[in-house]
Amino acid sequence: MKGKLKTSTFLILLFCILFVIAVPMVFHGYSLMVVNLSLIYAITTLGISVMLGMGGQLSFAGLAFMGAGAYFIANVCTGRLGFKMATLPALLLAPVFCGILAYVLGLILLKLKGTFFTFATIALVQVSFSFFMNYRPLFGGPDGISGIPSLSIGNYSFSSNNKMFYLLVVILAVVALIVERIRVTKFGRSLASVRDNDIAALSLGVNVYMTKVKAFTLSGVLGGLAGALYAMQGNFVASDLFAYNNATQFIIMAMVGGVNNTFGSIIGSVLITVLPEVLRSLERYLQLFYGLAVIVLMVFMPMGLAGVFKQLAKRLKMKKKTSSKASEGVIK
Amino acid sequence: MKEILKLEHVDKHFGGLHVTNDVSFSVKCGQVTGLIGPNGAGKTTLMNIISGIYLQDSGKVYFDGKDVSQVPPYTRAIMGIGRTFQAPRFLQRSNIRDNLLIGSDLSENKSFVKSFFSRQNMNFETELNRYMKVAGFGIDLDDDITSLTYGQQKLLEIVRSLLAHPKLLLVDEPAAGLNSAEIENAMALLNIAADEKGIGVLLIEHSMDMVMNICKEIVVINFGKVIATGTPEEVSSNEEVIAAYLGKDELD
Amino acid sequence: MGLNVIITCLLNGLAMGMVYALIAMGIILLIRAVGVLNFAQGDLLMLGAYVTFALKVDLKLPLWLMIPVALLCFCAIALIFMFSIYWPLRDASYPAAIIIGTMGASIVIKEICMLIWGGLPLRMPPLLINPETGGGRLITIGNVNLQWQYIITGLVGAIAIGAVFFLFENLYAGKMLQAASQDKFAAELIGIPTMITIAATYIISISLACIGGYLVAPIFTVSASLGTLLLRAFAGVIIGGLGNIKGAIIGSLIVGIIEAFASVRLSTYKDAVIFLVLLVFLVVRPQGLFGTTIGDKA
């Protein structure tokens, strides 16, 4: 349905353009920083969506890779290890580093099925958090590492929230397009088959184990990129972000937006990160409403916001469609 | 005609149960070979062993001249073993297009990079159109797979496996749950596979109409053992076979 | 490490392990009954601690009254939990939805506790108080000083778990619960009222967790951080073998002991130690100590 495709893509594009124009006008200083954080979190959430929405594997590990990326930048760009790398190559290297880490860990952990794998990722987060919080030489202990330089390309430095905002929008857009494109590649379909019917997948030539490992590697790359950007955005890394409680936040962000939807992951991240700031007045009851909202959402909209839109679109399409189909052959 | 599949003394136990007992037979290219026997005889188990989902306890499986006895199932699929299941196995959350593309992905063997940058593989459409005409119903590629009836899904599963250009096609009870028109279409598809594409088809079926109609050779299994092989005429007059289906008392 | 340190570690470890076992048992029962990993189990333990604190310290109920009232409260909590989280989500098309629902519940429970009792940790007096120090009473065996609270925790926990075991293995009601958890549809066909059995399972699981909260409160103080004990229970469940009740209990005890010994030498890294052990177990022996490997049927 070429017509239908255009409408939803058009709407998304329109929303994005409005977002990019409106946000810097409305949000300044601290609140703009929060928006930036939400865009960074969206990258991690995309990693979770790839694993859970596309591959059917619940992984808490995205947060651990985010930490790895953040501390990679923290160490490599501040000279703590004896040498100092420029920010741009470091930013490109961090996701690669985390990807390699994820690949190796994935080879080990994905020999486990289902809930076992999920537990293993929880253990991974706990172990890495324990080290992040305590091992001073690499992670600065409870005080964290400060003085991390912002990203600079040549003489241009992304040191203000404004500049970071536009940079993050571009990066997020590129990442989202890549993830979206992956859906329609052979790998994307293989991943879907792993999620929905892994025995059929095997008989259709899909190497289930390696497909999961590749997806995990991708989630590691995304987590690492997010972590690196996080370090450069706040110029500071401390371990509190990488605690287990926050891992559940990212999963909720993915589910709220629509677990198998790229744009949904972004919306979910932005909503859940930015809304608490907007609703500051309700501060005392904010978390309570948040928890209740999560429950209500899961009861009435487990497919997430994106899923709700899709259902509406389908119903509209059903109304338009005539009941007769050609009796032979394929219709477009 | 070339042998595409050969089983030699294949044996399988599940706990104390001897489900496959010294089974040897072969399947030739370009024809449909039937695998029949009473319920519980071990036919689906054999199919699972051939496709690699179960590993046999002893014996060998040769595919296209190569020993695949220890080869994992996804590699066997890539080598050219295709199959359908008793209950169709589709990706419930994907649309028809993606479900079929998975089939044709196998025949393409594109690398990830190429798949990422090139246009979507839509040249399977001429092939698909042709198969759908034989299958006898129309589809909208954007529909959910769940919108098809059971019979349509079973036929579509055969189409999906044909799109993968297999050399050997294992078909597990395609007629079960189909009406007579759909059974005709299934037979037509399998005939195309064998006669036109030169695929070796191994057919598990209970519907004797279908078996006698399209099989050139039949292998009969009872209690995990091969009790007869031969042409349909030879097998249908074989005393042991009749006894197995009808029970010994009937003969006396 | 001197002998007294070893013995103290063992006792403390077993006591804490028993608390983890209380959580773990609830988790396994719920997995078997409704197929869902309850991420709120740790917060239910915390809720149990707060509720018993309210009964004991705020309302100053005497022990003989407090216990039955507390148990009634636990039942009520269990039923409320079941009807708000499990009941609406039981047929969800996305299995992850129920799990996320329990995550939401976890947040809600934490927030409710904070709104009612404030964010500061509360001191719950131990069961047996040392009149001189006002702290927990000690018992001295040889030259080892052991806290009574730990001993009581271990014993009460063991009794609670033993009672549940007895129910499941020996009483008809227990057989019904087992049947319903293994195959809901078949159980319904033979007349087992699955709604009731599921409710009973929820009551047992959550009560176990709440009892654990009451036991552990004097040791840890009553605060939101009690919820994180859940992760130790997860570790215990895996080490013992997922789905196996006996294994979960033994696994939890092992986790408790590992934690106790680790906190002597590597106290800052004791989390890392516990979960590294878990990871090793998962990699080397994913079926745990007592689980069996389950194959896939094609």
Image (cartoon, coloured by chain):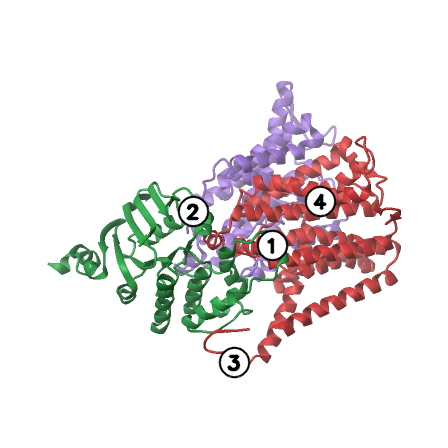
* Image spot of residue A288 (x, y percent): 73, 56
Tell which chain the image draws in red: A
Callout 1 amino acid = Lys
Task: Check disc 2: other Cα within 10 Å, few if <14, some if 14-19, many if 20+.
Answer: few
Callout 4 amino acid = Pro
Image quarter hosting the C terminus of chain A: bottom right
The CA distance from mark 2 to mark 1 is 64 Å
Residue under label 3, please give it: A323
Foreground pick, B102 / C149: B102
Residue under label 2, please give it: C171
- Numbered label attached to residue A95: 4
Callout 3 amino acid = Ser
* Chain letter belonging to callout 4: A
Foreground pick, B234 / A288: B234
| Same subunit, tags 3 and 2 | no
Residue under the image location 69 percent in, 56 percent down: A253
Foreground pick, B201 / A284: B201
* Chain letter belonging to callout 2: C
Foreground pick, A78 / A264: A78
Query: Which color was chain C given?
Result: purple
Mark 2 lies on a secondary structure that is loop
Give the residue furthest to the front. B1
Horizontally, residue A16 falls left or right of residue B12, namely right
Callout 2 amino acid = Leu
Check the image and report above or below for A33 versus C251: below
Report which quarter residue B156 is drawn in.
Answer: bottom left
- Numbered label attached to residue B114: 1
The CA distance from mark 3 to mark 2 is 58 Å
* Chain letter belonging to callout 3: A
Tell which chain the image draws in green: B
The CA distance from mark 3 to mark 1 is 39 Å
